[in-house]
Amino acid sequence: MTIKIRPVILSGGKGSRLWPLSRDLYPKQFLDFFQTGTLFQETLERVKKLEIEAEILSPCIVCNADHRFLVAEQARFLNGDCQIILEPVGRNTAPGIAAAAFLQEDPATILLVLPADHIIENNNLFSQAVMKACTLAKEEYLVTFGIVPTAPETGYGYLQKGKAVGEGFLVENFVEKPDEKTAKEYIKDGSYLWNSGMFVFQTKNYLAELEKYAKDIYSGTKEAVKNSFKDLDFIRLEEKSFEKTPSDSIDYAVMEKTEKCAMVAFDAPWNDLGSFGALFEVAEKDAQNNVCFGDVIHDETKNCYIYAENRLVTTTGVENLVIIETADSLLVANKDKTQDVKNIYNKLLHLNRSEIINHRKVFRPWGSFESLEQSARFQVKRILVNPGGCLSLQKHYHRAEHWIIVQGTAKVQLGENEILLSEDQSTYIPVGMVHRLENPGKIPLELIEVQTGAYLGEDDIVRLEDVYHRESK
């Protein structure tokens, strides 16, 4: 009988240790760090290239509702057929995996659960490890992958090997992220492996153990799936039930409690890209052991990670630094302290700073906009609308807008009237006028928008109709 494997891609993280590159509405899994595709896309490609004797079903992706169009667009770019489950609120990994499990028609289906932000360089060894894990999963084990450590890493949790079972081991202990001294002891001991956060198990076995050890998560997620509904190409979990579901990781909720927990050792290059230090490790270095992206000129600079997004960045006489320049932020950190970037993120969160939410360039399902200049009474934006893209039918209570077409053709609805505008033409939208912008052409529509008024916040949008089913914000 052919094994059926359903890849489940967990794509709900924020990547706060990679701020300011990673933002809440554009987190690390959707970034192309190495110009080879995003981490999310590489994960989709990884499961497509599995070399095992099994039927690989289309992936099931679990993500934040705010990321739904990013997920759909990046999956579409790879011509990927997938099922996208939207979490109305973040509830960690145990409920998200449960939602994917409840949606499976065949309880014997094996779920291959993978985070969307890992780098795995050897697909052959990964395929072999997945096959070993599937064999154990058919024997009713809940299997995780232990990464054979290459260094005393303090940024990962660890798994302690127990008794051998098949081509794997029982898990003796789950250990939290250790200090450096303890991590060195683990490496010397030889029985401790890095906790990868990847899992393999039969649907029915995971749900049975979840019901046994985390009944509230089981029942809450089951209800949220039962009352879920289709929205375009997405499955929306019912908010009320899912919101009441306890937030917990699969490790705490199930794996550390079940007697069926096993692991397969995976000895190949692996990285979860959890910090700029991790990015530095996997990137190509220059002769001075620096990693540089963008317009960077350095002198007497060693062992640094330098990222220039918008302007020239120069350094002299420095070493062991991380320097990240974006349109709205600059980070300078000691490379040995990159795990602590999360502390900066938390301070910005406490101050309610918008820089943790979005980049200056904000992506929408129809395209993007970028703020070029802003003061108390005006704002200038560059707007890009994809071919076929259509903004919502909307109005504003506090601002008027002037649109100047730079490239392409704009179909503009102004009240009851409709006009076509081409390059070098413009129009004016008074405060309170109902309007809509659409790109009916075959090339991107680019325009400059000048807003004037007493309040210019993004929440001054009243959406009357929207093809993307978004709310007024």
Image (cartoon, grey):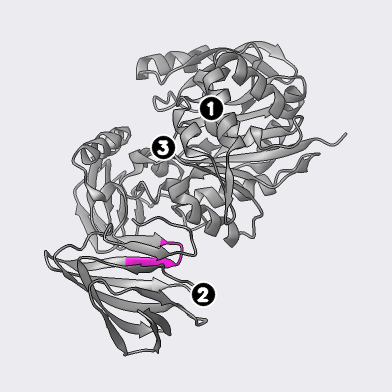
Identity, as a three-letter code, of the amino acid under mark 2: Gly
Q: Quadrant of the N terminus?
A: top right
Residue 173 tag number: none
Q: Is mark 3 on a helix, strand or loop?
A: loop
Is the residue 429 above or below the residue 24 in the image?
below
Image quarter of the C terminus? bottom left
Query: In the rendered structure, which disc, 3 or 1, sits on the residue that comes first in sequence?
Result: 1
Say which mark, if any, is on residue 388.
Answer: 2
- Residue 274 numbered tag: 3
Determine the image quadrant of residue 336. Answer: top left
Seen in the picture, residue 204 relative to 453 is either above or below; the reply is above
Residue 161, image x, y percentages: 59, 14
Q: Crowdedness of circle 2 by 10 Å Cα count: few (<14), some, many (20+)?
A: some
Q: Is the magenta stretch mostly helix, strand or loop?
A: strand
**Is 170 on the left or on the right of 214, as rendered?**
right
The residue at 53%/24% (across/down) is 217
Whether residue 267 is visible to the viewer of this picture, yes or no, is no
Q: Which amino acid does label 3 sit on?
A: Gly
Residue 380: image location, x then y, percent = 22, 72
Instruction: State how many labels appear.
Output: 3
Alpha-carbon span between mark 3 and mark 1: 30 Å
The spot of residue 190 in percent (x, y) is 54, 15
> Vertical placement of 153 versus 163: above or below?
below
What amino acid is at disc 1?
A: Gly
Q: Which tag is nearer the camera, tag 1 or tag 2?
A: 1
User: Which residue is farthest left?
Assistant: 376
| Residue, disc 1 | 220
Mark 3 or mark 2, which is nearer the start of the sequence? 3
Rendered position, 456 above or below 214: below
Do the numbered discs 2 and 3 sit on residues whose CB atoms are within 8 Å? no
**What distance separates the C-alpha of mark 2 from that of mark 3?**
37 Å
